Structures are given as C-alpha cells and as structure tokens.
Amino acid sequence: MAPTQLPLYSFLIFSLYIYLSISFASAILHPVDYLTLQSIHRSMSDLPGSKFFSSWDFTTDPCTTFTGVSCSGGRIVSLSLGDPRAGSAGLAGTLPASIGRLTALTDLSLVPGRVTGTIPPSIFRLPNLRFLALSSNLLSGRLPDSFSPFLRTIDISSNRLSGFLPASLFHLRDLTTLIMSHNRFVGRLPNQVSSPLIHLDLKNNLLSGQIPTLPSSLQYLSLSSNHISGQVETSLAKLVNLNYLDLSFNLLSGWIPGALFSFPIRSLHLQRNSFSGHLNPTSPVHEGALLDLSYNQLTGTIPKELSMAGTIYLNSNKFFGEVPGEFVKRLVEGKIRLLYLQHNYLTKMVIWSGAAIPVSASVCVQDNCMVLPVELSSCPVRSGRRKTRPAWQCNVWAKG
C-alpha cells in the first residue's frame, strides 16, 4: 500500500469503529427511542441518595442494561423512572415532551420525587399507553382534552395540577382506575361517567356540583374534601359493589339511603356534611366495618343494624332515645373497638350488672341527655368537659 494511502485507510478504520460502537449500543433499539432516552437523561437527574441513572451508560444496550427500561421488538414498551423501593430518593427535573414519541409504550411510571413542570399532552395520547402513574411529585398545569383510548390506569395524585377535568377522561372505554387526589382541580364533574371504573379517587381538590351517575362496577369511591353538594340517594343507589366510600368534608345533604348499608362496604365515611333525617338500614352493616357518620344533622333513634360495625362514629348529630342493647352486647364481647356517641340527645344506655367493657375499647357518651355510666369515660380531648346536656336542651326529646 502506498504511503499516501495510509491516512485515508486509517480514517476509514476509525470511522468504522465509531459506527460499530454506536450501532452496538442501539442495534436492537429504534433510533427514536434511543434518542428519547438521551433526552430523558438530559432533562432529569437523581436526587441525593438516588442512583437510578447510574446504569444508563449509552455505550451499552439500553434494553438489557438500563434500569427501568423494558423493550420488545426493538421498541421501549415499559418505562419506570426512578427506584420504586419504599423510602428511596426520587428524581428531579422535568418530563421531556420527547416521551410522547415512544409510540410502543404501554406502561409509564415515575416514583415520588421533585419533578416539576407540566405533563406533556403527548404523553396522555400515546397510542398504546395503558398504565400511567406520575404521583407525588411537583407537576403542574392543566390536563389535555384527549387521551389514549387504551388507558386502564391513571394515577397523577399528589401533584399541583389544576384546571377543569376534561369530560372525555370519564368516558374512556377501558379505564378502571382513576386516581387524581390531592391536586387543585376545579369545576363540576360530568353528569355521567361511562368508563368501567373500579377505583375512583378525587379527594382533596376543589371540585363542586353534584355526584354524577357512576358505573355499578365501582368498588372504591372517594370524593372527600371537595365542595360537592346535593343529595346522594340517586347517585349511590346502583353502586352495589362498593367496599369503600368516602364522601366526607363536603356539602352533601338530604337522607342517607338505607340500601347503602347493605352494600359490602368495609369503610364508610360520610362525616362533616349536612345529612339529615332518620337512618333506615335495609340490613346490618358489614361485620367489623368502620362507620363514620359524625358531624351531620341525623336524627331519630340509632338503628341496631349499625352495631355490627367495629368502629363507629355517630357523635355530633341529633340522635335521641336509648342506645340499642346490641351495641352494649358487642362492646362487652370486644367486637366494637370504638363507639363515639357524644354530642347527641340520647336518654339511656343500659349496661347490665356484671358486664365489663374491655379496657381496650374506646367509648364516649358524654354531652347527652342521660347520666353517664361510670365505666365509660374514654372521650377524646376535643369532646369538651360537659358531661350531660342541660335539662332545657333535653325537654324536646323527653318522649324519646
């Protein structure tokens, strides 16, 4: 080979080496996906204590060596950003819009951390996306009007998201889990939800209006700590599969439907509303359930069907008459762990001779229209010091 040819030959060899090195690193990964990983690495970083990005060496194969990356057919199908182990430090930075180019992506998750900025609308519209979890960060901004039709799970809770909830979000044909609690969403919910939801959590927002018509598939529903108003009889009547219901800290009024207590609910939170009228359960509540109806305007006698619960808050209402013997019996048997009846107009609670309520049980009946049983004194500090109501307040219930 002539000496004048050596420089060109060396250059070709060097170029081939560089090409093969880059090709090896991305040979089984689509170029767009490869470039997207690079943009993620530039936009996000580990918080102190996190080592998530330590495996992201772009001279290696991302599909086999990058933590949080799963591939199929040369495309990224799952992307888990951050170490999912409990207590692990999360990530900082922003979500790059380029994630919206991962068109084969089915699962996208982000561990709790300090990621800021908006969620790029293109992420919600990824054509194959089924699972989206971006909770407990500092994400802000509004939601887009359109979403991937295949989404099954959305969890964007505990961020700083705001604005109105798009109606289209509640009509996705495959959506079963929607968690958007602890944000700053405002406005009314749509009149009807057609998605086959099983789990709906919108607590701690600024939502208003009435509870919409919901799918009977629901098992978990939380609208707590909003400005939801109106009555619930119609909206709850068909939710026969509910095992968790939290409507507390709202502006709800009217009667509590008796059929609600026949649902398989293990945890029922209706406190801090303006529910009124008598309680008429159609059957006993689920044994051992938690039942909180406190701080309402409920009246009448306390139904014995509620005694099957294990934790019972009926305080701060307008109940009158005698505490049913079934409550005392289950207290003595240790099956009721907490019974708060303070701040009502109850006139009698009979504890038969020789009966002993376990010391582990918390029972409070102060500030009623009766002489307190000596054994019952485990009231919370916020109950105040008054043991019984003055006679003039109790005269109206004398016949109860």
Image (spheres, grey):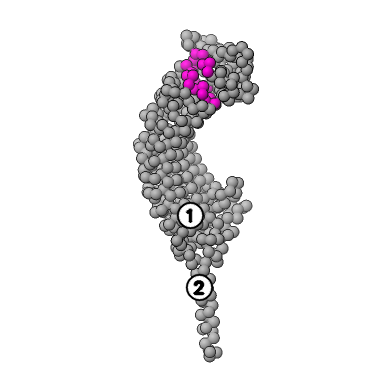
Task: Tell me the residue that label 1 is attached to.
Answer: 78
Q: Which of the two discs, 2 and 1, labels the residue nearer the N terminus?
A: 2
In the displayed image of the protein, which residue is found farthest to the bottom? 2
Q: Nearer the viewer, residue 361 or 140?
A: 361
**Which residue is drawn at the image coordinates 42% and 46% (left, top)?**
152
Image quarter for residue 328? Answer: top right
Camera sees residue 248: no
Against 72, residue 272 (above or below) is above
Q: Nearer the viewer, residue 311 or 232?
A: 311
Q: Nearer the viewer, residue 311 or 143?
A: 311
**SS at mark 1?**
strand
Against 153, residue 264 (above or below) is above
The numbered disc on residue 110 is none
Q: Which residues are magenta?
A: 301-326
| Type of amino acid at the residue the image marks with label 2 | Tyr
Task: Tell me the residue that label 2 is attached to.
Answer: 19
Camera sees residue 324: yes
Horizontal side of residue 143 vs 8, given as left or right: left
Q: Position of residue 252 (x, y in %)?
A: 43, 28
Residue 234 lies within the magenta run: no
In the displayed image of the protein, which residue is found farthest to the right? 359
Q: CA distance from mark 2 to mark 1?
A: 28 Å
Against 62, residue 295 (above or below) is above
Sort mark 1 into few (<14), some (14-19) or many (20+) by Cα contacts within 10 Å. Answer: many
**Which residue is drawn at the image coordinates 41% and 53% (left, top)?**
128
Marks 2 & 1, CB-CB < 8 Å contact: no
Q: Position of residue 124 (x, y in %)?
A: 42, 50
Residue 311 lies within the magenta run: yes
Q: Position of residue 195 (x, y in %)?
A: 38, 41
**Which residue is drawn at the image coordinates 47% and 45% (left, top)?**
155
**Which residue is drawn at the image coordinates 55% and 57% (left, top)?**
67
| Type of amino acid at the residue the image marks with label 1 | Ser
